[in-house]
Amino acid sequence: MYELRYFDNAATTVMSESSLRTYQEVASAYIGNPSALHQKGLEAKAYLQQNRARVASLLQIGEGQLIFTSGATEANAIVLESLIWRQQKGHVILSAIEHPSVSEFARLLKHLGWSVSFLNAPGGFIRCEDLQKALTKQTRLVSLMLVNNVVGSIQDIRSLVRTVREFEKQAGGRHIHFHTDATQALGKIRFSLSELGVDSAAFSAHKFHGPRGVGMLYNANPALENLSRAGDQEGGLRGGTENLAGIAAMTTALEEAYASLDRNLGQVGEINAYLRERLGSFTILSPSQSCSPYILNLSVKPLPSEVFTRMLYDRGFCVSSGSACSNNAKQKGEGVLTAMHYHSELAKSSLRLSFSNDTTLSDAEALADAIISLYQEHA
Ligand code: PMP
């Protein structure tokens, strides 16, 4: 038996001990529903708001701009579904490298009579000139991710937002909602929501050692409406009883991630640089500049990703082929890589290695040895 070594942190991370402890403590200490008017409800409500204030202060946003959700999928959905309320159908711009929780809305929106443009991202990057060409007077929403989950490329969201704002001025001033899926960025790389200038952003706790099934939406657009207000929690943008223990555990994980962000970046950066060097004979699909060090994607051409992933697992390594979500829906990760203009032969053989502050250099050495020896044996 091999010791298990985990290199799939972009799919999910292990909950930190303190996040897990917070979860257990809060789940047993706060028994009331935050909407209830008795003392236990009021205590839960006050604690919920205290968590909101702590997270809002880390993100440097207003407390009213923070909506707790069940994850990034739901946060993305709240924004995209809001379009369904519009009286007139319009136009939406997405990138062709979005996570399925964004890109799959294209089907629904087209079905409802909207038009959707997809922007390619050559080498991993969405270009301002392509966005500029795609904008029309009918464009109502632009959704472009901050860090790509397949290769780690960091988009220049600030310039992309500026392109939209300049277009708005020329086109008569109608506001276009700019959403970013920042799931792979939060707690890992530094960014400022106000500097990016986005109207909304989606986040997920389980990517930064918090629990699965909890996330957040940042929303600065007062006109955003949910498909259903349901029970009116979270300012009417996300109905349903709040997952207080999960939210508190996320707050703990986020505070920890922020406190050690630079140290973690340094450690993960070293591991990434080591693997880039050791695996330098393979084609590296992650860009060398403007890329999150937490993700390294490479091609083991001509061996198929699924086969290589399984062989690595047999040696005790968890890695992902393309992206975890694409493992269920065939070809999606490949679609993202071809939208980055990588040849389909490279895309079919892509391996995604993803790291966390738990990853050690000796794990990375063992992984590099295994990749090199498996490749020599089978290619
Ligand atoms: N967006 C991106 C970029 C992601 O990587 C993920 C997680 N795979 C999601 C959205 C979905 O997040 P969640 O699991 O919280 O719904």
Image (cartoon, rainbow, N blue to C red):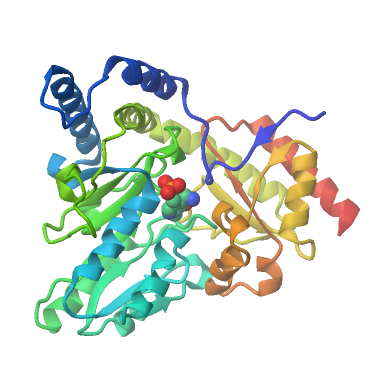
178 left or right of 318? Answer: left
Nearer to the camera, 219 or 293: 219
Viewer-closest of 325 and 34: 34
Q: Residue furthest right?
A: 377
Q: Is residue 14 left or right of residue 112?
A: right
Question: Looking at the picture, does residue 318 appear above or below residue 123?
Answer: above
Residue plotted at (13% across, 43% down): 64
Where, by quadrant of the figure, is residue 145 drawn? bottom left
The quarter of the picture where the N terminus appears is top right
Foreground of the two, 270 or 72: 72
Position of residue 269 relative to residue 219, above or below, is above
Residue 157 picture location, percent across and down: 32, 62
Q: Residue at x 71, y 51 (%)?
A: 279
Q: Provide residue 314's location: percent of width, then percent of height.
A: 80, 40
Residue 337 appears in which quarter of the rendering?
A: bottom right
- The percent coordinates of residue 65 (x first, y second) are 17, 46
User: Can residue 361 be seen by looking at this rendering?
Assistant: yes
Residue 150, placed above or below residue 17: below
Residue sitting at x 60%, y 57%: 328
Q: Position of residue 11 (x, y in %)?
A: 54, 46
User: Is residue 182 visible in the rendered structure shown here?
Assistant: no
Work out which quarter of the rendered image holds the C terminus and state it.
Answer: bottom right
Number of numbered discs: 0
